[in-house]
Image (tube, helix red, strand yellow):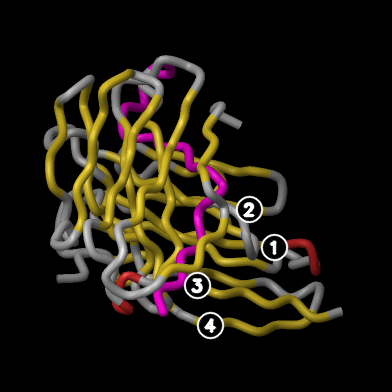
């Protein structure tokens, strides 16, 4: 457990509405990531952050934006949700304390359904 | 582009059998992680391997990183029903913000 929480855990919304998912960590990790998980695709990176106000795109960033105004919070926003964004969303942090710099730990996930 | 190919994607075996899951790539990685995920939960890290040829054991699970650091395998001896779950491999590189490339996952079902 790396002190990662996600909210909400479940959400149902309608096409065209904005949605914001929150990831909160308690251990002051610099790097945070947002992934989506869909059957047959494993996890795919949406956006990541390497510090407060420092973010970059992943492989499936279209239709998503992120913000990080505090070290502990990383927000993922769907500006206008579409049915193709129905998925399970995972937040992760990168733990560099053990010297294995690519090791990531994951939150419990948010299940999003866009109708 | 799927840089990490995981096989098999589905595996159903009887309790007590052995199994191996493979994770292959044409790219070199600086590290390789294996995760296990249960329904409704996030992936949980099992092991990280960083040296070509490295072998790590975790009770009945044996993980190997290929000599060229392009592939990895997970071997489970005498599988138990509690091993049921989704197994994911992920490759990392030293550059690029610590991003991981994930395989598609292997859905393992161990029947009593």
**What residue would you read off at disc 1?**
B77
Q: Give the percent coordinates (x, y) of residue B69.
A: 25, 49
> Total number of numbered labels?
4
Tags 1 and 2 in contact by the CB under 8 Å rule? yes
Tags 3 and 4 in contact by the CB under 8 Å rule? yes
**What residue would you read off at disc 4?**
B10
Residue B50 vs residue A56, the one in the foreground: A56
**What residue would you read off at disc 3?**
B106
Up the image or down, B53 lies above or below A104; here it is: below
Mark whose residue sits in front, 4 or 2: 4
Up the image or down, A79 lies above or below A23; here it is: below
Q: Quadrant of residue B15?
A: bottom right
Q: Secondary structure at mark 4?
A: strand
Q: Is residue B83 left or right of residue B35?
A: right
Compute the Cα span from label 3 to label 4.
6 Å
Q: Residues within 10 Å of mark 3 (few under 14, many from 20)?
A: many
Q: Residues within 10 Å of mark 4 (few under 14, many from 20)?
A: few
First in residue order: circle 2 vs circle 3: 2
Compute the Cα span from label 1 to label 4.
18 Å
Tags 1 and 4 in contact by the CB under 8 Å rule? no
First in residue order: circle 4 vs circle 2: 4
Residue pictured at 40% horizontal, 64% vertical: A37
Compute the Cα span from label 4 to label 2.
18 Å
Up the image or down, A106 lies above or below B82; here it is: above
What label sits on residue B61 in the rendered view?
A: 2
Residue A79 can be seen in this image: yes
């Amino acid at each position: 457990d790396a002190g990662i929480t996600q909210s909400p855990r479940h959400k149902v919304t309608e096409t065209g509405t904005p949605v914001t998912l929150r990831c909160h960590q308690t251990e002051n990790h610099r790097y945070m990531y947002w992934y989506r998980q869909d059957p047959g695709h494993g996890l795919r990176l949406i956006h990541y952050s390497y510090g407060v106000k420092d973010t970059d795109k992943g492989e499936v960033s279209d239709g998503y934006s992120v913000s990080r105004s505090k070290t502990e919070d990383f927000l993922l926003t769907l500006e206008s949700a579409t049915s193709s964004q129905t998925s399970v969303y995972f937040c992760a942090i990168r733990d560099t304390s053990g010297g294995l710099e690519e090791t990531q730990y994951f939150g419990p996930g948010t299940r999003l359904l866009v109708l | 582009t799927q840089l990490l190919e995981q096989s098999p994607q589905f595996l159903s075996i009887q309790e007590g059998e052995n199994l191996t899951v493979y994770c292959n790539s044409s790219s070199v990685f600086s590290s390789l992680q294996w995760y296990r995920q249960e329904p409704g939960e996030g992936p949980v890290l099992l092991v990280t391997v960083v040296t070509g040829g490295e072998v790590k054991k975790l009770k009945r699970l044996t993980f190997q990183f290929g000599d060229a650091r392009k592939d990895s395998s997970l071997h489970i001896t005498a599988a138990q029903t509690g091993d049921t779950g989704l197994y994911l491999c992920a490759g990392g590189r030293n550059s690029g913000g610590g991003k991981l490339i994930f395989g598609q996952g292997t859905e393992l079902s161990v029947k009593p």
